[in-house]
Image: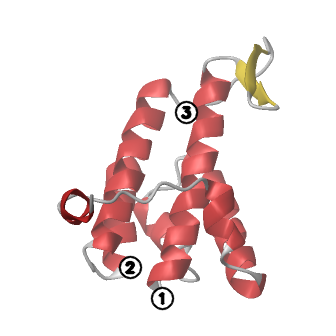
Amino acid sequence: LPTLVSRCVQFRVETAADAAAGIEGETAAACRNAVEEMAAILREGGGYTRAARSLAAVEGDRDTARCFLSALAEWIRREALASAGLADADGRLREQPGLRTSLSPAWAAAAMAAAEEAARDLDRFVKPGYALKSMLLKIS
């Protein structure tokens, strides 16, 4: 009934692929590059200042920041699987004994929560640079 539907809260659920599909060209490349750079910095323990500089290409507008957060969430997911010695093949988990990462499962959980909070901040019209740097403070 329309009366019931009008009182419902709608949640948009999308995968990283869905988010990246709407953004093409230079923006998608900037998101991928920023995540790769951020991943290298976080693995090395490079600190907040260095990591914040890597956000320059993606903190300009909301859509680019969302694309970055989706790609970052996918990377965090892969790191969490690697820390457990698991790999994801065709949507199925399989044990891979040699697979390990320097990032702990506790870090992955905290990082995912921080990325989700940054996405909610973007939905509340917080400036993209502030939302991303706030997330970075929590995970670096």
How far across and how far down the image is residue 22, in percent? 66, 76
Element under disc 1:
loop
At 42% across and 34% down in the image, what residue appears? 109
Residue 3's mark? Answer: none
- The reply to whether callout 1 and callout 2 are in contact (CB within 8 Å) is yes
Q: Residues within 10 Å of mark 1 (few under 14, many from 20)?
A: few
Residue 68 visible somewhere in the drawing: yes
Q: Residue at x 31, y 62 (%)?
A: 120
Say which residue label 2 marks.
Answer: 128
Q: In the depicted view, which residue is nearer to us: 8 or 27?
A: 8
Q: CA distance from mark 1 to mark 3?
A: 28 Å
| Residue 104 x %, y % | 50, 27
The tag earlier along the polypeptide, 1 or 2, is 1
CA separation, marks 1 and 2? 7 Å
Left or right, 1 with respect to 107, comes to left
Mark 3 or 2: in front is: 2
Viewer-side residue, 131 vs 136: 131
Seen in the picture, residue 14 relative to 124 is either above or below; the reply is above
Say which mark, if any, is on residue 103. Answer: 3
Q: Secondary structure at mark 3?
A: loop
Residue 49: x percent and y percent?
43, 68
